[in-house]
Image: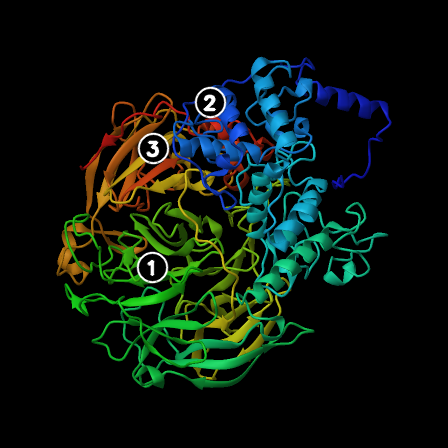
Amino acid sequence: TDIRHNNGRTIESGSRGYAQLKQWMEAGHTRSGVPDETLADNLGVCVNGAGHHPLYTPGFGARFPASFQRFRNEVQPVLHDSCAGSRCHGSTVADLYLTCGDSEEELDWNFWVSVQHLTTPASTSGFLRRPLSTYRGGVFHEGGNIFASAEDPDYQVLFQWAEELVTNNPEAIAPPTDISEGLRFFANRVQPTLVRKGCMFMNCHSVSMFHDLRLQTGAQGHFSRIGTYRNYETSRLLLALDASDPNESRIIAKNLYPPEFVPGSPGIFHRGAALFEDFSTDGTVNGATPDDCAGFDLDNGDLNEVPAYCTMIRWHEIERQAAIARGEIFPDSDVVRAVAWISRPTGVGEPRDFDTYRPGADLMLASASVDAASGDLSLSGGASVLSGCGLDPSTADLRGLAVSWDGETLAFGARASGSAPLRLYRMRSDGTNCERVPGIAASSDTENGILTHDFDPAFGANGALVFASTRGNSDASILGMSGPTRTPAAMQPNANIYVQDPGGEVRQLTYLLNQEMQPSFMTDGRIIFTTEKREPDFHQLAGRRQNLDGGDYHPLFAQRSSVGYEMATEIVELLDRNFALVAAPLDAADGAGQIIVVNRSIGPDQATPRPTGDNYYIASQRHPTSSGAWRSPSPLPTGRLLVSCDQGASSLTAGNFDFQLCELDVDSGRVREIGGAAGRADIEAVAVFARADREIFVSSVAEANGHTYIERGQTDAQVEVVDFPLIATLLFSNTREGRPVDTNIGGIDVYAEYPPPMGATGFGSVSANVQTDDYGMMFLDRRMVGHVSLNPDGSTHFRYPGGLPIVLAATDWDGNPIMFPEGAAFSGPVIQREQMQFFPGERSHQSFRRELFNGMCGGCHGSITNRELDVVVDIDVLTSASQAMSYGTDPQSLGL
């Protein structure tokens, strides 16, 4: 191994201390030193439904009939009784996912997946070593020791079957011949490197952790085929194939010096330290670059000699060149082909004010090139391409510009007059073949006295087109009204997020009452956007995340002004998987603010000071700009940002900014003006470059931070809250300063909120429902849906009409409102200050048991106790995270 220790080598392998530590660990590393010989039970009932995997072809058992028959008769009963419970290997989280085996399809799957965990000799297989007691030759198993010794009769059944299969049918465990070179290199070179660097330690990147890189561990050198494939897919998602610089890959950048430590370095702060920085010697900092790898045999050299960084950049090169060969991304010589942007008169309006007609907007397109040595972006030949759309720049109003995943298409919102709504257009990325996007517009231009705008498009990797629209709910029964509505926050036309699927179907994704806009895609296919949250004594524009199937409407960032600002707009994911956004006060003009980069691995941040001497707190925000006015961050394949800037602006509230096109290096803070016209606002620029194909994220019960799925065809939403008093601590506070759980909470009042009535155009016409606070006036129509009682452990299960905007209020065990204590952020009843939604047909699990919170959520949200050292993994989260008194109970029905 090559595991970094900041204090150097303090224990020699031949020392007495080393021997004592080794003996203690081998004896079970218990506090008493006495081995715990307790055997683990199979938890939960088995599940039905054969699994699926890219490497699996049904009918595998028919190829090996004798072994399959023995598996059916002898092995399956042992697996059923010892391993296949729903809280063990009956969970899809497990790489050895086992079904009940009640059908031929399930038996075939169980046989195949078991074989994938065999190797030769059979005794070294994870299939045999993981369930065996660690005191009798087994290896660590998240589910505990299942068999006390290799002499256990049931263990012998597994062993003899495995031994016979690998001896008589070695072709059953032979690796596939048609795997990609990238997967082969990962299995042979990258995965061992990650092991050597300690990445798979339990408290780092094990499957028990709560982050994107959850790695299946091996069994003392042997990785199952499925485990390797999962590790490959998970790691590859953090490889920036679209970037010419391998250091933009999150899996690499997280292990390089961050700019906070070494100014200008491309790394990202990592709790596990800069593990790939192996080139600094004699006290001299020498940040890793590809040039440091010259002279090493990266394909065949001894992994004990080849630097880990070099292995990773070689993997990036293999995967990137394969993507270029498949035509997914542009070659290095043509990495950015063009830049498109909207040029318009100054005074562009703030993001929520899309309904105001502002003519004079033009769509510009310029050729682009990237200097191979400096990485600087240059533009040439900028010209208008709007005339081909039948639009006149003197009268056109444009909003939102996007480039497709393959770099071939541009989309934008446009209209030609104030009486027409914004409609979506598309053209080729060279400016030709402009047309209205077919099949996407609402059935009428105006309804309920409101224009049915479509704007802010964003392309998914699968060709889906996500956009904002004011057309209103697709299901009128949710609110009891049809068509567009106005926002309670400002009586503006209410925009929600919609998607046109690749087949042409248009679906509604969000249902809340204030603005949801400016969507963009994460690399894994989830969408992120800005939502307006307005309730009494609260107003915030915050980030949201949602799956494209509608599930897991989830807070993203900037949920409270404690982050240091009240508006987070134009949120995008960078190629290194960090987020960039525009941060501003509520009264900022023209959507202007400062550029913020958010390390998504760290979690919520806060502007308020932490206690002196708090060395554990890590800021997740970086501030590459601190003056001027900025807008429209958009990623470049060089790792830099394309932005709109008015560097001379002295106030964000002044307005009429002369935005120019700029290139921003977020690591060094360097800014270069690269285009634009003086006296005009050049905004919403996008670079035309192609991105590697990625799958679209689907709601899953196996996703720890979004345990949900969609049951198509159903209209209700079912929500199981495992520990409401715990999750209530997150509803009002977003700082890492402890989470006091109120055990007086014994129930939930669920309220629905409704928009202003049809025909209302201003607060004056709905004065009976208008409230005034420090943020101004707002409309509030809040109606009780029902009361939900909690179980003694704080859990509950309820169902209500899916899509209905709701807020939750805490009550005591008798149903009386709980009040905010003196000194709290709010006063009065403890009631949520933001609407939330669950999608029609969504089946969602919320929260964790409080004793598991620190290990799963404490890394981002802080521990319950406010001690950072309490943030430590608990492997019980794999088997017990959702175990509560509500488990398996029928939901309480509200409003149905």
Query: Label 2 amino acid?
Result: His
Location of residue 62 in the rendering, given as x and y in whole percent from the top left corner: 49, 35
* Residues tagged 2 and 1 counted as in contact (Cβ below 8 A): no
Query: Label 3 amino acid?
Result: Glu
* Residues tagged 3 and 2 counted as in contact (Cβ below 8 A): no
Within 10 Å of the Cα at label 3, are there few (<14), some (14-19), or many (20+) other Cα atoms? many
Say which residue appears at 50% left-offset and 64% top-offset.
594
* Residues tagged 3 and 1 counted as in contact (Cβ below 8 A): no
Give the mark nearer the N terminus: 3 vs 1. Answer: 1
Give the mark nearer the N terminus: 2 vs 1. Answer: 2
Query: Which residue corresponds to mark 3?
Result: 720
Location of residue 531 in the rendering, given as x and y in whole percent from the top left corner: 36, 55
Query: Label 1 amino acid?
Result: Asp
* Element class at badge 3: strand
Location of residue 702 in the rendering, given as x and y in whole percent from the top left corner: 45, 38
Query: Which residue corresponds to mark 2?
Result: 80
Within 10 Å of the Cα at label 1, are there few (<14), some (14-19), or many (20+) other Cα atoms? some
Q: From mark 3 to mark 2, how far is it between C-alphas?
A: 28 Å
Query: Which residue corresponds to mark 1?
Result: 501
Q: From mark 3 to mark 1, how far is it between C-alphas?
A: 29 Å
* Element class at badge 1: loop
The part of the image, by quadrant, that contains residue 125 is: top right
Say which residue appears at 85% left-offset and 22% top-offset.
16
Q: Quadrant of the N terminus?
A: top right
Asked if residue 216 lies left or right of residue 710, the reply is right
Q: From mark 2 to mark 1, how far is it between C-alphas?
A: 40 Å
